[in-house]
Amino acid sequence: TYAYKPLRLGWYIDWQATSTAAVANLEYYRTVRVRQNKLGELYLPSYTISPQLTMQPGGLGPIVQANPGQVWLIGNEPDRPYSQDDVMPEMYAQIYHDAYHFIKGIDPTARVANGALVQPTPLRLQYLDKVLVAYQLQFDAALPIDVFNVHAYMIDEAYRKAGADVPP
């Protein structure tokens, strides 16, 4: 019911992949939520993804099939520990690879985007560089990306303080 047309918006996000709420004249960007598994403060060599990369009911496959040509964001702020996706760069490269190829294998017209960095600061861009290098080393290819995504917040980057914290 909000009068959003004067804002001239083109798309919106609600940080999930399963929403069926349509907003007239706006494109909906779907988010595949990711998180590196941890044991206390120890990052484990495994991850959780939601919806799961499966063709089973409730999995990502049927959602991709039902929504051809959509934009899929792989995570949200993987560079932000504790309050967002909290993923080490090397693991994010793995997660992105798995999700990208799963989605593109079902719908080659899908557009896949990285999970937005918190903000485009030197510290966050260093995290992104580590993701890009890790992807190249793990898969002997550049990270395939259809849409590049970054938030434009201006918040403090201090270890364990309010704000963006520091990347894992």
Image (spheres, grey):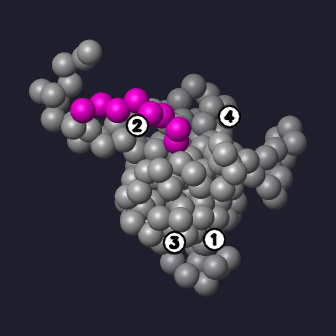
Q: Main secondary structure of the magenta part?
A: loop
- Residue underneath mark 3: 143
Does the rendering let one see residue 54? yes
- Residue underneath mark 2: 13
- Residue underneath mark 1: 134
Answer few, some or many: residues within 10 Å of disc 1's Cα (few below 14, many 20 plus, some between 14 and 19). many
Does the rendering let one see residue 123? no
- Three-letter code, disc 1: Ala
| Towards the viewer: 103 or 95 | 103
Between the residue at mark 3 and the residue at mark 1, the CA separation in whole angstroms equals 9 Å
Residue sitting farthest toward the right? 39
- Three-letter code, disc 2: Ile
Answer few, some or many: residues within 10 Å of disc 4's Cα (few below 14, many 20 plus, some between 14 and 19). few
Give the secondary structure at mark 3: loop
Answer few, some or many: residues within 10 Å of disc 2's Cα (few below 14, many 20 plus, some between 14 and 19). few
* Residue interval drawn in magenta: 17-24
Between the residue at mark 1 and the residue at mark 2, the CA separation in whole angstroms equals 28 Å
- Three-letter code, disc 3: Leu
- Residue underneath mark 4: 82
Of labels 3 and 1, the one closer to you: 3
